[in-house]
Image (spheres, coloured by chain):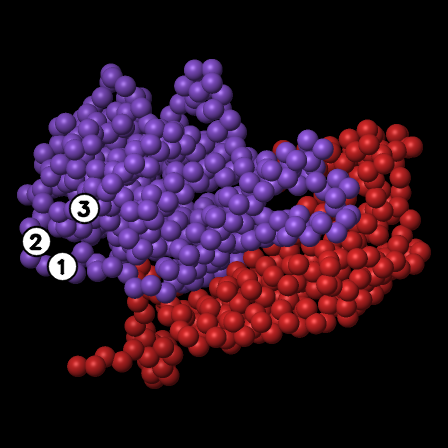
Chain colours: A red, B purple
Amino acid sequence: MVVRILRNPPVPPAGRGGPVRRPFIYPHRSIRSIRITPGRIFLAAVTAIVLIVLVATQQGWLVAEHNRLTAGIVELAGVPVLGVEMVSLFPGLQAAPAVVVSASRLDGKPFQLLIMFAVAMLVLLQIHRRLPLARGFVLFLMVLLLVATAIVVFHPSSQFGSVEFTQIWLRGEVLVWLVLPVFSAAMFVLIHPLFGAAWALVTQLYGFLWSAVRLAFSICLIHYTGILFVPIAWFALGLLADMVYLVVSYSIAVEWASSRAWGRRGK
Amino acid sequence: MILLFIAEFFLGLAIVVLTLYAVRHYVFALCRLALRRPRDYMELTGFALPRTTVLVPMHNEEAVAADILQALVECDYDRTRLEVLAINDNSEDRTGAIIDDYAARFSIVRAIHRHQGAGGKAAALQEATRQATGEVLLLFDADYFPGPSMVKQLVAPFSDPQVGAVMGRVVPHNTDKTLLAALLGLERAAGYQVGQQARYNLGLTPQFGGTVGGVRVSALNSVAGWNTESLTEDTDLTFRLVLHGWKVAYVNRAECYEEVPETWPARERQIARWATGHTDCLHRLWPALLSSRSLSLTEKVDAFFVLCCYLTAPILILGWLASLVLFFSPQMHSVPILAVAMLFVGYQIFGNQATFFELGIAALLDGMNRRVLLMPCNLFNFFASTSAISKALLRFYLGKVWGSGGPGWYKTRRFRTNGKERPFANGSSTAPKLFSQGADGIYTYSRSGD
């Protein structure tokens, strides 16, 4: 006897209270698996390669647009843009434009430095006290703030401005844009082919736009507060934030794929 | 210059270690997603059910003692071959009275009262094992809810004479209580649905977790019983068993409900105990693991991955500090920064991403609903665990240096209130049948015996 299990059969006509039988038989979660077919692997590879090639060949245009967007947001925030300077990224890649703004230097302003440090530390201490789950992360931010303050006080020559920061930022982000398709393909396409491929593209676009917003915010921080919050901007808003949006995209993809794979009754 | 060299060394170390663990997470997740599972022992017929003793160690468990005992007396295992040993381990509350009440009403329940001797779960198990009459010992913590078929499901793999221990799946039931509990629910799903099952699929060693599991008495005797010195006697037993040539089986279908910590202090104590116990096992067992002839190379590598997993937390913190030093170094603005930047990317994204991939695969296979959208919040859990584990390991190593013995055993706090907030309130088929809900919402059990 052959038993056919249909994934999404038409719902049979039911009584007054709606369907009374489950629409299909779903396997118990302990024995579920998803076949990674050659087709899925092929689609994942094609998605990753296409996106990587696009980023690599259009890198010059991408960073130029990224800079235009960043400069627009910075101006929108009321920070005067003094100009654009070209910075080198990696050998083999085109140089990228970087927004120039005047950076506040705090080494000659101990009172201002003290006030900003104290306020930031108080805010972090309050979060530390009230949100137990965030304590580890807040502790990490406190260390970053302490180190930045120490740099301003004891080693002021290590301070840098918006151009150097943009250079560091873009080096990280360009690598993220190049590596992201591999993760997207593995994480999205393997669990749901067509949705996954489309979602990988959406995530890539989001990563590009979100990077410009975060960089603009960091440049504004440099303009108003100098290097004091730069480590926090880099470590918390930089690559860590890239990971956060990738995880958010992934959780949405899993939720979507899960409901398609097993149906509502399989939850 | 020396500082830069040290920073580069620790950053490199963090990258290498995290990349190795990331690869392991990806391999496990993909194997669980796609590989066929080994034959389910429950499909076997024709073997005799062995005489089984269920051990339930309890220390101040009055809030939960009746639930677990009730669930066990309702299980569908042959009564002539079943014994439940409820161990009152130096309790100062009504636990002893509840156990005595059950022992008086049900002939399969026996009470053991411990008022002296060494404290802790392993010592209680040691004493109960001496009094047990079964060929197989099953273990449940007092806050667990075994379903009616649980005993059969866990005993079935012992039909294979090579199997020395069996582990079932732990599923938290209080994931709707706090954000932390929801996040721990995701973490448990990844650990069991993906981690344990993938290890079993790949012929590696699933970990015996000391609850929702069982051990063959002859296997336990062959490794000289429970280690009362260990903070994680379950991990210790797992590796002593495999070193003696026994197999550990994993039964994903044997799902048992547990309570995960709902507050961060309780979670911190729990994970600190696990970290210390695992690392202590590593220090005691690594020479035997390296020289073992009963383990294949991949099994040895996996054993080291398991035992070293908590060491990644302090290595990660050292990596962060190293990145901070390098961030302000002049190298950041020169071209050779390529290597460092690559390391940043690899370390910040790749290293952590793999654990989320595993979480997602577990959620997908479990058919998890909107709760999976909380996955990004696990980043906070990750940071919090990293600092808690690092503190615990620092205390452990300082204790070794100063000979103070490190942290002691903590009992994980229970959050269930007596008579309220029981799982299965929605009429699930696995609900203990004798519970009935009164008009005030409080559940009570009938006082009938066997």
CA gap, disc 2 and disc 1: 8 Å
Q: Amino acid at mark 2?
A: Phe
**Residue at 44% of width from left, 48% of height from top?**
B187
Real-space Cα distance between discs 1 and 3?
15 Å
- The tag on residue B44 is 1
Give the total of numbered labels. 3
Could you tell me which chain the residue with mark 3 belongs to?
Answer: B
Q: Residues within 10 Å of mark 3 (few under 14, many from 20)?
A: some
Q: Are marks 1 and 3 in contact (CB under 8 Å)?
A: no
- Please give the residue where the numbered disc 2 appears in the rendered image: B47
Q: Tell me if B234 is positioned left or right of B9 in this view.
A: left
Residue B380 position within the rendered picture, expressed as x and y whole percent measured from the top left: 57, 44
> Mark 2 to mark 3: distance in Å?
15 Å
| Residue A112 point in image, percent of width and height | 88, 34
**Residue B255 against residue B110 in the figure, above or below:** below
Question: What's the amino acid at mark 3?
Answer: Val
Q: Are marks 2 and 1 on the same chain?
A: yes
Viewer can see residue A28: no
Q: Position of residue A179 (x, y in %)?
A: 61, 61
Q: Is residue B95 above or below residue B137?
A: above
Which residue appears at 79% of the width and 33% of the height? A151
Tell me the residue at 85%/59% (across/down). Answer: A86
Label 3: which residue? B163
